[in-house]
Amino acid sequence: MHLPHRFALCCLISIETLGLVRATPPDFGPNVMIFDPSMSTSQILTTVDAIASQQISNQFGTQRYALLFLPGTYGSTGTPLTFQVGYYTAVAGLGSSPNDVVVNGSIDVYNQCGSSGCVALTNFWRSLSNLNINVINSSACNTAEFWAVSQAAPMRRVHVNGVTTLMDYCTSPSYASGGFISDSEFDDTVTNGSQQQWLVRNSQLDGWSNGVWNQVFSGAVGAPAQSFPSANQYTTLATSPVTREEPFLYVDSAGNFKVFVPALQRNSSGTTWGSGPAPGSSIPITDFFIAKPTDSAATINLALALGKNLILTPGIYSLAEPIFVLWPDTVVLGLGFPTLVPQRGNASMIVANVPGVKLSGIIFDAGPLNSPVLLQMGLLPIHLGSNPNDPTLIQDVFFRIGGATAGKATISLVVNSDNVILDDIWAWRADHGTGVGWTDNTADTGVIVNGNNVTAYGLFVEHYQKYEVVCNGNGGTEIFFQNEMPYDPPSQAAWTEAPGVDGWAAFKVANNVTIFKGYGMGSYSFFNQGVT
């Protein structure tokens, strides 16, 4: 479906809001929509509903969108702003605080219905961040903020006034397999419902309904008490050991676009913004190279070598060579789920052994020729070049082997550097879609950690053909792990680690590791071919 050009004009206008003259936004390309509170609700809905109608069923399509809202108020009690979020759509406010962008209405994800019923099990690759929602929903059933999602659908820096539900209870059987929330505040109950598992990190809760298999709370004020392994399967940690929230795009009081980098926190709980401005620093947009999908890796690498940070705008990036991140403290920010696809059996991105790199909001697809690795953090597994007070971050980064296109990759993510924080990672060897089969979308391992003192929150790794995760580094901490074994080994002989050892472990901690901590770790299996 082609969107009329007038839908893209909202990202090109000069804006006067709240008495301030807004500078013309940078050229983020045609798929970044920037909304202004002076626009009518109907005008906004014309754009967002057209995108939703295209994207709700577009699981493996190539279209990507970012829907960005300038500071102000949208919708009203009489005319709420209520819309759905489909695949590859990022919805975000452009304030310095979530409360700077107020939506009277709801921003929803519902079940998808088919011959076997209505479920949210494949509601992937979408996000909601940095805004305040006063829940108004006039539907006879939908009276809450609905976020019925599975993996790779984070909610960050969101303030919800009203009930939030993580399942769509209006249609059945409503199964869902999420999920991730961080730095968010909920002023009413969160309904977990049918969600198999979920991680809430550094947030404020006012009631949580129930658990199913593995509900984990880390630094979440108001979280239910630890009850694992009793009925609700709650794992509750009062604080998170080391965190840094995801960098985000915002507009300052003078109308300038910037990227805010939140400060490092230790042993923290609650939100970063609930008691006043979040600590951190800002980077002017002029310090970024704003890449388009038509840019080559060589063009992007030149900008990075010259010291620019990087914004990847929505689209598919075909890469004949890796993107190299060489400088400390470089920010690489994806808008609208940019997707990197290697074309020559190369890695898509390699980060040097340097501290403080922040990488977020990107999909790494496997390409047509086998890649040894898709994302490599640290050129070599040497314990040099890192800084525990300036850790590297990988946040909302998702890997996919097959599904959208035929692809192969031996390892999805290798972490060679020390003191890295992984925060919402989904590595998925596809179990449906294009190019799917035991000898088609081949992939040994999702994540290998060679660095020391690596902390992971929300590690989702599924269907790989050998070890799903390998931890070779010492001092690692894993808070929430979700795994499904591969569905499709054709025989036990094809899926055997060694003689007498059937299958492969979901999470392998190397024999030489002396310190490792794991909380809320779950793995389950469903074999539909030759393994019983």
Image (cartoon, rainbow, N blue to C red):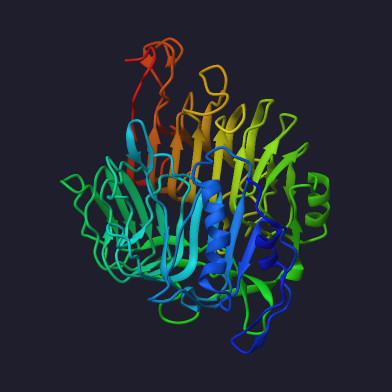
Looking at this view, name the residue that lies furthest to the bottom: 19
Residue drawn at 57 percent across, 20 percent down: 440
Residue drawn at 22 percent across, 47 percent down: 233
Residue drawn at 25 percent across, 60 percent down: 208
Q: Does residue 465 appear left or right of residue 201 in this picture?
A: right
Residue 417 coordinates in the image, percent (x, y): 60, 47
Residue 130's place in the image compared with 517, above or below, is below
Q: Does residue 382 appear left or right of residue 267 in this picture?
A: right
Q: Does residue 377 appear left or right of residue 507 in this picture?
A: right
Visible residue check, residue 421 = no
The quarter of the rendered structure image containing the N terminus is top right
Residue drawn at 72 percent across, 33 percent down: 346
Q: Quadrant of residue 344?
A: top right
Residue 107 coordinates in the image, percent (x, y): 44, 61
Visible residue check, residue 363 = yes
Residue 89 coordinates in the image, percent (x, y): 55, 53
Residue 113's place in the image compared with 129, above or below, is above
Residue 22's place in the image compared with 230, above or below, is below
- Count of numbered tags: 0
Residue 232 coordinates in the image, percent (x, y): 19, 49
Front in this rendered view, residue 165 or 363: 165
The quarter of the rendered structure image containing the C terminus is top left
Looking at this view, name the residue that lies furthest to the left: 231
